[in-house]
Amino acid sequence: MARILVVDDEDLVRLTLRQMLEASGHEVIEAANGRQGVALQAENVVDLVVTDIIMPEQEGIETIVQLRRKNPSLKIIAISGGGRLRNMDFLKIAANVGADATLTKPFSTQELTDMVDRCLAG
C-alpha cells in the first residue's frame, strides 16, 4: 500500500493512527512535531502526510506550507480537535494553505481510511 508520515505531538494519537493505518496495510513513519515531520519527509519517500494542526515547536499550518513548498504533489491530510482557540477554524486555514483534505478529531477508523484512500487515488 502506501508509506504515510504521521505528525502529531501526542504519543497516544500517533500510536492510534499508526494502528489504524497499519491495519489497512500502510507503512507508517512517525514525527512528534512539524519540524521533525518536515525533516523526515525530506529524508524518506512518503505518499501521504497526516498532520495535526496544534503542536509545539512547529504548528501544522507552517508544516503544511513547508511540505507543499518542497513537494507540491505530496498528499496532505490535516487533523485537529480545535485546540486552545476553538473559535478559529484551523482546518479551513489548513485547506487554504495546501491540505488536500481535513478531518476533525475524534474520527473513526473508517473515516480516516476512506479519506486516505480518496487522497491516494488522486
Image: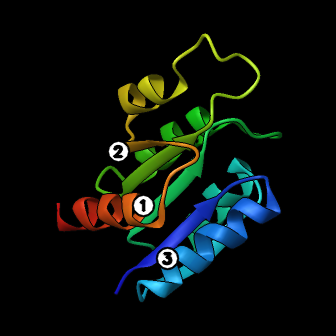
- Residue 101's disc is 2
* Separation of marks 3 and 1 at Cα, in angstroms: 8 Å
Labels 1, 2: front one: 1
Q: Quadrant of residue 12?
A: bottom right
Q: Label 3 is placed on what type of residue?
A: Leu
- Residue 112's disc is 1
Instruction: Tell which circle, 2 or 3, labels the residue nearer the N-terminal end.
Output: 3
Instruction: Tell which circle, 3 or 1, labels the residue nearer the N-terminal end.
Output: 3
The structure residue drawn at horizontal position 32% and vertical position 49%, both measured from the top left corner, is 72
* Separation of marks 2 and 3 at Cα, in angstroms: 16 Å
The C terminus sits in image quarter: bottom left
Q: Label 1 is placed on what type of residue?
A: Leu
Q: Quadrant of residue 25?
A: bottom left
CB atoms at circles 3 and 1 under 8 Å apart?
yes
The residue singled out by tag 3 in the image is 21
> Which element type, helix, strand or loop, lies under badge 2?
strand
58 vs 105, nearest the viewer: 105
Residue 4 appears at what percent x and percent y?
Answer: 48, 72
> Which element type, helix, strand or loop, lies under badge 1?
helix
